[in-house]
Image (cartoon, rainbow, N blue to C red):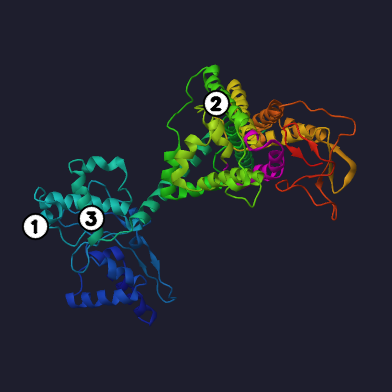
Amino acid sequence: MMLQLHKFFRKSKTTSGTPKATYNACASRSAARPPESQRRTRRMMSVFIHPHATRSLLRGIVWGIPSAASTTAASISSRWPSAYSCQAPSATFSCRATWHSPRVRGWTHGAGQRRTFFSSPTIIRDYEELPRDYRDQAGLAFSKRDVTDAEAEKIFGPNMRAPAANHLLRILHGRRVAGTLEDPAFAIHTSQFSAVQMAAGLEYLRKEVPVDEVMNSGLRAEDELALLEDETARAEQKQVKAGGPPRGVDEAAVEDYKVDPVYGPSQFDMIRARNAAKAKAREKALEEERKDKEAMSATTAAGPVVERQDEDRKRAIANPKIAEYYEKAQSELEAPPELRAWERILPSATVVALVVGFLAAVSMVYEEPTARYRLLREISTSQATVGTIIAANVLVFLAWRVPPLWKVLNRHMILVVATVRPLTLFTAVFSHTSLKHLLVNMVPLWFVGTSLHDEMGRADFLTLYLGSGAVGFLGSLVTYTLRGWLTVTSLGASGATLGLCSAYLWEHRDDGFRILGIPEGGVHGIVFLAMLTALQLAGLGRTIKHKVDVASHLTGIAAGIVGVELIGRTERKRRDGDRAVIELLPRRGDGVGAEAGSTAVQLATATRTSPYGHAKKG
């Protein structure tokens, strides 16, 4: 810098009228220096005149020619702020200053160290200031002075001497700046130190020499990524020059790409081919993702499964505590147990037959309590029974919102084809994880269930409800086992509710149903039953797409019809004209309505005897 200022003074004299004098910078460097006081004055002036005066204050000014150990300005990495060359903006003179690395004078610190006015090394903290000659085994200076034996003993314990401690601290500080703390490629350089010693050294450095380690690691990752991209680009260019399409481009996507024999490869053709390949790769990835989802749905999502919704699962995983409950609720099996089809079906079929037979036997001897023995005398028995069933379903629905209960519910409230438990064919009837699924099942249960309960009584009603639900899930078990869908899980009261609806419509298959008084004679119940069955049959083959357990629905409908026939103690004896007309939605002013508990239907004909022995309003 002093040589440049000296040149400026000579040029100023020339412009003021004195004769021009040639000046050789190299000769001036070898010439005798001015006195010490004059050199000191010029040095202080250079600090304020030079555009990079702030950097000069930080880096220090060192006289002398660089030694062989230091690097020239041309070889210094571009990340060094001190490697910059400045052009003075003045029109009267031109100043171009070059900064050189300091001469290393006999100390053993790591690479990239600088001296200040007080001959102490500059502590490098930023990755962008990392010197080009940095080596991991040498490290970087972490302090203006080395630690003493006493300090080393305080940091690492009595087994570490000062030279080894300083060596380890320099390596660790260099890795903090270079962003290689977690890089196993450099572990060989600190293999002689234990993990405890390295942890103690890092703790000391982080306390005494703060460094943004995350930022430095990110900058290093960016440089490595840029290097990989450069290597890839060079490989593509080399391949294109050899006469082939760019590297990584699908041949089918660039079948029209040909190198011009005269002008060589076209950059536009390369870009077009690369874009076409990327588009085809995206389409291929989307297609594979779609196929994977379909395959997953085919094996795990047939029926109203208990699989959490995507957004619910993301929320569960985001919370560490909920994620813990979620993991505990999962099965430890990696694959379904290898069992024959009859080994999966027969135990559950036996349990269903025994339980339904027991319920049928109880219903034959059960007598409903009189009004004075009932707990809720204000409501009918049908409302009390159906209301209790709905309350149980709502209670289980709320239990699914409590993460600690997931493990128990997954074990006892879901039908799992792979590891079926016979009891779950009955308990899954009361289990819902979706509010929509719950409402779709409970609303028809209330309207149709109360009417059917009034006709057949509590014991027969409960037998039909539980039997339809259990037989419906048994049908699902048989269907999915024979089809090989062993990872299907199903739950819900759909089979039981459809069984009750089909039983009621079958009992009133010859009766007419009117809606708002239309039509006059009503629509036969068998028509509504046929429509209900056809709606379920339309879902065959779409179990995967709609995630609806069609097998349990159809089996539940069949079980309801068979059950209501078995429960009837006598055959119906119908005569001409002995036909009821039932109001589904009565017009305003029509009659007094249905009897208590039957909120959905209103009977409009004379009273007659039902096949169950109860009086039915007509």
Instruction: Tell me which label, 1 or 2, sits earlier in the chain.
Output: 1
Q: Which quadrant of the structure image shows residue 327?
A: top left
Crowding near pointer 1: few (<14 within 10 Å), some, many (20+)? Answer: few
Work out whether 558 lies above or below 600.
above
Q: Residue at x 18, y 65 (%)?
A: 119
Q: Quadrant of the C terminus?
A: top right
Residue type indicated by callout 3: Glu
Q: Is residue 290 above or below residue 121?
A: above
**SS for dot 2:** loop
Q: Residue at the location (20% across, 52% down)?
A: 200
Place of residue 384 in the rendered image (x, y in percent of width and height, measured from the top left) = 62, 46
Residue 268: x and y in percent read: 64, 43
Secondary element at image label 3: helix
- Which of the marked residues, 2 or 3, is nearer the chain's N terminus? 3
Asked if the stretch drawn in magenta spans residue 435, the answer is yes
Q: Which residue is disc 1 drawn over? A: 150
* Segment colored magenta: 432-460
Residue 203 badge = 3
Secondary element at tag 1: helix
Q: Nearer the viewer, residue 519 or 481?
A: 519
